[in-house]
Amino acid sequence: MKSREQKTDKGRKKGRVRWGVIYVAVFLVVFAVSVMIKLTYNPLEKKYKVIWNDDVGRVYTDLPYGEGEANQFDLYVPADNHKKSYGLIVYLHAGGFTSGDKSGDAEMLKYLCAKGYVTAGINYTLFGEEHPEANVYTQSQEIKESIPAVVKEAEKLGYQLDRMAISGGSAGGCLALIYAYRDADDSPIPVKMLFEMVGPASFYHEDWTSYGLDKSPEAAANLFSVMSGRTITKDMILEHDYAEEVKDISADMWVKEDSVPALLGYGTYDKVCPVDSAKRLIDALEENNVPYDYIEFPHSGHGLQNDNKLYVQYMDKLDEYLERYLGGE
């Protein structure tokens, strides 16, 4: 028969595990809800809205790139199809890794296509009850798999691609960061630049204070295990011995001297994606002398909705990046 002390200890362990699982659930729900705010509220929508018609471009939807149900992309091509080559811009959707769809970025993709670029929105398998095996790593692998299919389809339509930029918001920003810094060397066409907003760029539990991960090694172990698809334990968190387990989803760990330039936007009061995760990336960019511009929105959270002038500044800076690194309009 177990002693009272053994029963108490067992009960405490179960409680810690239960709270770890709860932290994971809370993170996913908060991430998804906050992203919906970002997707449904944009005070500057009209400023960057394009009147889309055949004189601007055409869109081809739900093109396949893999075997999975979610392995589809939308391709936007400019009406002018007489250039020798085109730049490609891939924009990855938000949704907390659990929701969202490429169609939610249609206005952004049209806006960029209207500037003369071939653009693509890509779906990926979302984590949830239907796909509990999905995680940030598997999603990043799907994005990697999709790019050759996007290039092939564009060329089949008569658009020769020889350079690209990758982007996204929130979860999509995280996946864009991973592709730009982990997978760019394997890209079928050269990656020339990255631009993204509020995407987690690094995974150090002490930075994720809004979820209490700095105070709960059990919660940190559970959340990072779910996101990475690797087994991370409480002891690994306590000993800071989990870098290899999160490396494949941590953009900051892949930055090197020839990495691509970056345009980054984050909110000071973001409770969903910790701004400190971006600062880890900035440290890596500076250490390797990689050009970047970082715009912090001092009155905003995850939606970046309280600093309209800075949003315009970000978009103006994006035009500069496109001109400099992707060849202009």
Image: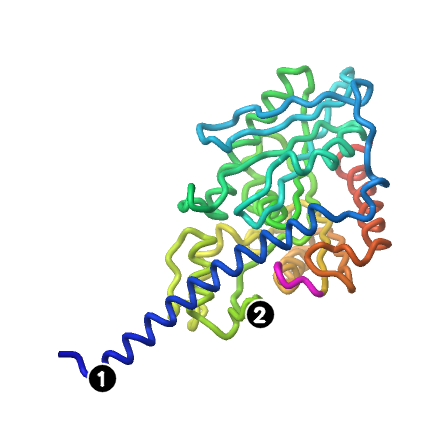
Choose top left, top right, bottom left or bottom right for residue 30. bottom right
Task: Please identify the quadrant where the C terminus is shown.
Answer: top right
Above or below — where is 255 with respect to 215? Answer: above
Q: Nearer the viewer, mark 2 or mark 1?
A: 1
Near-viewer residue (236 or 297)? 297
Tell which circle, 2 or 1, labels the residue nearer the N-terminal end: 1
State the count of labels. 2
- Residue 272 forms part of the magenta stretch: yes
Q: Secondary structure at mark 1?
A: helix
Quickly name the residue at label 2. 209
Q: Residue at x 42, y 51 (%)?
A: 229
Near-viewer residue (63 or 43)? 43
The location of residue 323, given as percent across then percent down, is 81, 37
Task: Please identify the quadrant where the N terminus is shown.
Answer: bottom left
Choose top left, top right, bottom left or bottom right for residue 72. top right
- Residue 313 forms part of the magenta stretch: no
Quickly name the residue at label 1. 4
| CA neighbours of label 1 inside 10 A, class few (<14), some (14 to 19), many (20+) | few
In the picture provided, is 163 more to the left or to the right than 321?
left
Measure how far apart labels 2 and 1 are at the Cα level. 35 Å
The location of residue 139, given as percent across then percent down, is 50, 42
The location of residue 283, given as percent across then percent down, is 65, 62
Magenta segment, which residues? Answer: 269-273
